[in-house]
């Protein structure tokens, strides 16, 4: 059997088209609740007749580090992408982590394409496109900029005509539906050997599992997954992270403004707090998540700072750089001196005046912490030969569907 080797792992060649779906923000309860409703018969069939398992995502439980873990098969300590946003010490600047220069290894997608497979990637937001498609020969485009594709840049032309839908709003469920609609059209027309579909968590930030809006979203997804199955695809889905309520009984966000706290304790500007959830699309979460990194002044005793931060209400884990790199499999040189993770219903901010929460039209739901680490793995095939004691990770999905289905 033909195999390829990427980042220390071997993958069997596709026997039939393989579709990997990353459902952004898919807390496992979204699937169990929509299955209970009876509105997603195909998803229910996948869960009952295929494989339905739970896995752990990467912490910080954010989009970029987890999507890149999935498509490389390894954690951020190896591939280098440890957030959506970080402080680049070399540049002495806070920057988005969506430049491929920060990616340290080849993706599995690029490796299969180099070996002769036809590969297609459709992602909701354009922030992921250049990372997912780095050095990959094939089709790669986003819903967000589907009207700007070219053969040279994206490996495809006139996506809007192919899909038969207009460019959706970036703040809508339609952005994710466009991903699935494009995936079905590509499978009908191009029949790629390997396809990666990545959605946005706009709905999950607003709607809890079992709510009408959430069930409507998964009902929509159900129809497209059924079509992909009917076209002969092996489908495996997972999530980049879960999602939880981050508000109090009144509906107000539960926020620890860590920069404000440290400024009060140690003096204004003495520390730098970085929120890796930050990306160009913050209206639905106000750049508030449950994971932060702290850079302390040179010469300070980090353990003293850690001990004091631990006294704040809502802290789940406060670790040194070395401890966090080891526990969460992160590149030590790309995180702060201290890593702070808040509890299930608490988020971390920088300074209060820096967060615009005017766009929150419903009580805050967000992610980033250990409490959002549990994600589903669902496959339309039975997966065999997996050790019963093995800790599954979301970045095992390509190994599972190619080597165990």
Image (cartoon, rainbow, N blue to C red):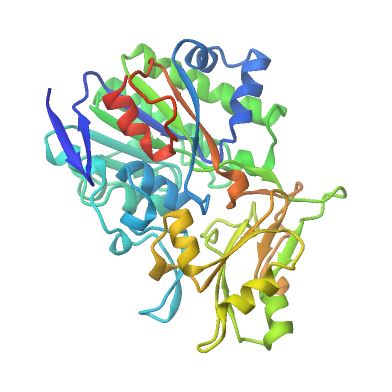
Front-most of residues 335 and 321: 321
Q: Residue at x 61, y 49 (%)?
A: 367
Q: Could you tell me how many numbered marks the image carries? A: 0
* Percent x, y of residue 47: 51, 17
| Of the pair 334 and 84, the residue shown nearer to us | 334
Q: Is residue 155 visible?
A: no
Q: Which quarter of the figure has residue 143?
A: top left
Identify the residue shown where x is 35% and y is 59%. Answer: 80
Residue 60, compared with residue 101, is above or below; it is above
Q: Is residue 386 above or below residue 243?
A: above
Can you give x and y, in whole percent of width and height, for residue 11 in the image? 22, 32
State the residue in front, 260 or 95. 260
x, y percent for residue 348: 66, 62
Residue visible at 42% across and 59% down in the picture: 330
Please identify the quarter of the rendering in which residue 404 is found. top left
- The N terminus lies in quadrant: top left
Q: Is residue 345 visible?
A: yes
Q: Quadrant of residue 99?
A: bottom left
171 horizontally vs 231: left or right: right
Residue at 68% in and 86% down: 266
* Quadrant (top left/top right/bottom left/bottom right) for the C terminus: top left
Q: Is residue 149 left or right of residue 83?
A: left
Measured as percent of width and height from the top left, residue 135 is found at 21, 51
Give the residue at the far front of this rendering: 389
Rendered position, 51 above or below 82? above
């Amino acid at each position: 059997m033909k195999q390829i080797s990427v980042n220390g792992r071997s993958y069997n060649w596709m026997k039939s088209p393989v579709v990997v779906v990353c459902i952004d923000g898919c807390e496992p309860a979204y699937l169990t609740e929509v299955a209970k409703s009876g509105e997603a018969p195909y998803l229910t069939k996948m869960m009952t007749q295929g494989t339905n398992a739970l896995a752990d995502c990467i912490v910080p439980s954010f989009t970029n580090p987890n999507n890149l873990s999935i498509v490389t098969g390894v954690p951020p300590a190896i591939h280098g992408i440890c957030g959506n946003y970080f402080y680049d010490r070399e540049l002495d600047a806070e920057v988005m982590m969506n430049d491929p220069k920060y990616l340290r290894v080849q993706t599995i997608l690029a490796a299969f394409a180099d070996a002769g497979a036809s590969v297609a990637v459709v992602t909701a937001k354009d922030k992921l496109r250049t990372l997912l498609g780095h050095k990959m020969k094939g089709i790669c485009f986003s819903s967000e900029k589907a009207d700007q594709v070219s053969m040279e840049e994206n490996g495809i032309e006139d996506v809007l005509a192919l899909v038969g839908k207009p460019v959706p709003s970036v703040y809508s469920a339609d952005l994710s539906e466009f991903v699935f609609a494009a995936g079905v059209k590509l499978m009908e027309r191009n029949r790629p050997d390997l396809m990666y579909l990545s959605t946005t968590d706009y709905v999950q930030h607003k709607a809890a599992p079992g709510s009408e809006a959430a069930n409507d979203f998964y009902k929509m997804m159900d129809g497209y997954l059924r079509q992909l199955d009917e076209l002969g695809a092996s489908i495996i889905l997972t999530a980049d992270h879960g999602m939880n309520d981050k508000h109090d009984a009144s509906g107000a966000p539960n926020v620890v403004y860590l920069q404000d706290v440290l400024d009060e304790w140690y003096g204004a500007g003495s520390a730098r707090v970085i929120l890796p959830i930050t990306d160009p699309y913050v209206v639905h979460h106000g750049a508030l998540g449950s994971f932060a990194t702290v850079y302390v002044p040179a010469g300070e005793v980090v353990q003293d700072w850690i001990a004091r931060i631990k006294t704040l209400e809502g802290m789940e884990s406060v670790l040194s750089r070395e401890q966090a790199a080891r526990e969460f499999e992160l590149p030590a040189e790309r995180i702060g001196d201290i890593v702070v993770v808040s509890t299930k219903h608490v988020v971390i901010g920088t300074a209060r005046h820096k967060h615009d929460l005017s766009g929150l039209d419903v009580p805050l739901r967000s992610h980033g912490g250990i409490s959002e680490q549990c994600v589903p793995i669902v496959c339309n095939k039975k997966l065999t030969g997996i050790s019963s004691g093995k800790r599954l990770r979301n970045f095992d999905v390509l190994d599972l569907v190619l080597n165990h289905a």
